[in-house]
Image (spheres, coloured by chain):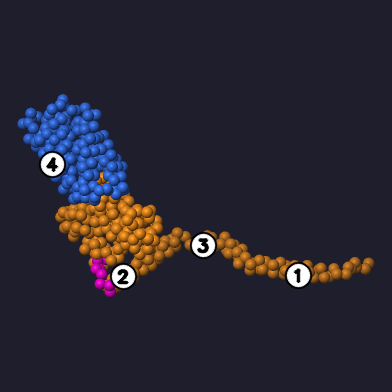
Amino acid sequence: MARLYQRPMCIASSLMVPMATLATPPWLGLDGVPPAWPVIWLLPWALADGPVSGALSGLAVGLVMDGLHLSGSSQIPALVLLGWWWGRLGSRAQPIQRSLNLGLLAWLGSMLLGITLLAQLHIRFGWPLALEMQGWGWHTIWCQALITGLLTPMLASLQLLLWRRMPSK
Amino acid sequence: MAPFLRPGNSRWRGLGQLTPLLLLLAGLVLVRFSKGAGFTDAYALISRPFWPGPAQREWIVSANDVQQTSRLKLLERDNQRLRGLLSLQQRGSQVGLVSAAVIARRPRGWWQLLDLGKGALQGIAVNDAVLGPGGLLGRVSSTTPATARVKLLTAPGHEIGVWLPRSRSHGLLVGMGSSRPQLRFIDRDLDVRPGDLVSTSPASTLLPPNLPVGVVQAVNEQAAPATAAVVQLIASPEAIDWVQVMTR
């Protein structure tokens, strides 16, 4: 089977990440916090394509997402790490496709992403962070992880199904 | 038969003839002491059908608007003249307003920003002030030829200098990520109260002066190292579809 990065349609699906980030309606978030779209896209990709492809895809999506956001904090470290980890899980273990597993992995990924962003805030604004900002940070982490974990089983299952059924060249 | 006469009967009869006059006098005294209450009430009751209707109220409101607008213009002119005398930057008089649609918004989450449908081609530049209904929303942080990205006042670490007109004190408005930024002061003993208006500084060189920003919601006098306050912003980015960018 051809690797995902060799299929133009699979690569084109990554365009959905910035588009979804820009177009997320307020009602799709939890208390206004949108889901982590890079995590939702990266999980099935890394599971299907292995650690190296996962890490490189994490880097690519992270670069795009950092460009879309304000400077200051970067999503790249967390996405590269997640891509590598999920790629190893996908290549070494039995295929992960149950909704609960996908949701749990996405929840963990979103938590890790949030924690790295909060850590970067700590570095930028000094330790300890103001109490209000810390409260807001943890609130954002939990809301984002929850909505990402809820949405991923639906979307990632669909992605895995489509990518596996797609005829190889 | 001789008529029946009683002594003093004629005196009572004279008093009886004066009764209407005395009643009238008493009534007038009552009117005097009640400040004409009966008359005005009666007049109000009778004239009610002829009272000014909603149309007249609109005329008054409209006239009031005209008066307020002209007063604002006079004050603005006066302000410009005084600022000129003080040799301050006269940005307020030179700015242009560009209306732009909000094409994407992320008012919550890690990056609190708006994406606008107009950019450098329309004269929008980095650090331009962005206004929503009610007041300042944020500043332009980057532009492309066709879009502009606005960093909201609530974004973590976003700092602008502000002014409290009532207590005539300066402060630093710092975004904390939550919907209510924090106002930090340099001095400890300040006359800041909940309900105080927060605006951009009259002497601001980064932002147009005297733009309303928010209202002080709570004051923490125990905060270290100086007094701090929580500010409720007037303009809400969650429900805005159009904004105005003050270009320079």
- C-alpha gap between disc 1 and disc 4: 111 Å
The answer to whether tags 4 and 2 share a subunit is no
**Is B144 situated above or below B36?**
above
Q: Position of residue B171 (x, y in %)?
A: 31, 60
Using the image, tell me which numbered label, if any, was put on residue A59: 4
Q: Main secondary structure of the magenta part?
A: loop
Q: Is mark 3 on a helix, strand or loop?
A: helix
Q: What residue type is labelled 4?
A: Leu
| Residue B234 forms part of the magenta stretch | no
Q: What residue type is labelled 3?
A: Phe
Q: Which of B73 and B163 is in front in this view?
A: B163
Q: Mark 3 points at which residue?
A: B50
Q: Specify the subunit that label 4 lies on.
A: A
Residue B134 at least partly seen: no
Q: Mark 1 points at which residue?
A: B18
Q: Position of residue A86 (x, y in %)?
A: 16, 33
Chain represented in orange:
B
